[in-house]
Image (cartoon, grey):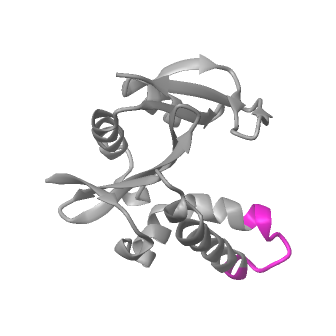
């Protein structure tokens, strides 16, 4: 049985589960951000950076929202909604590596979209075909071949989507 929860503080998230869910992203960050360190040291640093961001920035940002999908009371997928322009920006959609290709990300995204009464945006790397397909499957519309950040920076290796009820 699946259940969507909204998390309102970092203390509600099991640390080890959060790191497991984001393990692929954290491994990439470790290699990119700490190339001079051993992989285990780099991964530990990337995990600490992410946890600090979540605790000190994300959960302190007014309007930021974190959702998790549980299956049989186990965290299987999650995402963040960050305040953006005239709505929210989807960030960090992830699914437990052992639970991929079972529909959890679609279920999560559809559930979140049904609960949010604002325009929702998303920026997806152009090479991430799985994520692009997920967005399209869930009804988000691809509207730009770049991503515009709140600071005005344009990212040309991303495309942008939006969803509006």
- Note whether 12 is above or below 66 in the view shown: below
Q: Identify which residue is drawn at 35% across, 62% down.
A: 7
Foreground residue among 148 and 78: 148
- Residue 92, image x and y in percent? 52, 50
Judged left or right of residue 94, residue 49 is right
The quarter holding residue 113 reads top left
123 drawn magenta: no
Q: Identify which residue is drawn at 77% across, 29% down.
A: 156
- Residue 22, image x and y in percent? 51, 61
- Note whether 160 is above or below 90 in the view shown: above
Query: Quick one: which residue is furthest to the left in this view?
Result: 1
- Residue 152, image x and y in percent? 77, 35
Judged left or right of residue 31, residue 84 is left
Q: Quadrant of the C terminus?
A: top left
Query: Quick one: which residue is furthest to the right in this view?
Result: 36
Foreground residue among 153 and 78: 153
Extent of the magenta region: 31-41
34 drawn magenta: yes
- Residue 21, image x and y in percent? 45, 62
Q: How many marks?
A: 0
Judged left or right of residue 65, residue 25 is right
Q: Identify which residue is drawn at 40% across, 71% down.
A: 17
């Amino acid at each position: 049985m699946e259940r969507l929860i909204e998390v309102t503080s970092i203390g509600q998230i099991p640390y080890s589960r959060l790191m497991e869910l984001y393990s692929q992203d954290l491994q990439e960050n470790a290699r990119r951000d700490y190339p001079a360190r051993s992989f285990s040291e780099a991964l530990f640093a990337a995990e600490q950076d992410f946890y600090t961001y979540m605790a000190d920035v994300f959960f302190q940002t007014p309007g930021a929202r974190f959702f998790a999908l549980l299956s049989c009371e186990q965290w299987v997928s999650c995402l963040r909604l960050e305040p953006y322009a005239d709505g929210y920006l989807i960030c960090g959609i992830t699914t437990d590596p052992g639970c991929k290709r079972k529909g959890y990300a679609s279920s999560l995204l559809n559930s979140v979209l049904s609960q949010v009464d604002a325009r929702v945006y998303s920026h997806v790397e152009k090479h991430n075909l799985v994520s692009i397909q997920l967005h399209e499957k869930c009804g988000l519309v691809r509207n730009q071949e770049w991503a515009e950040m709140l600071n005005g920076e344009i990212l040309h290796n991303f495309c942008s989507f939006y969803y509006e009820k």
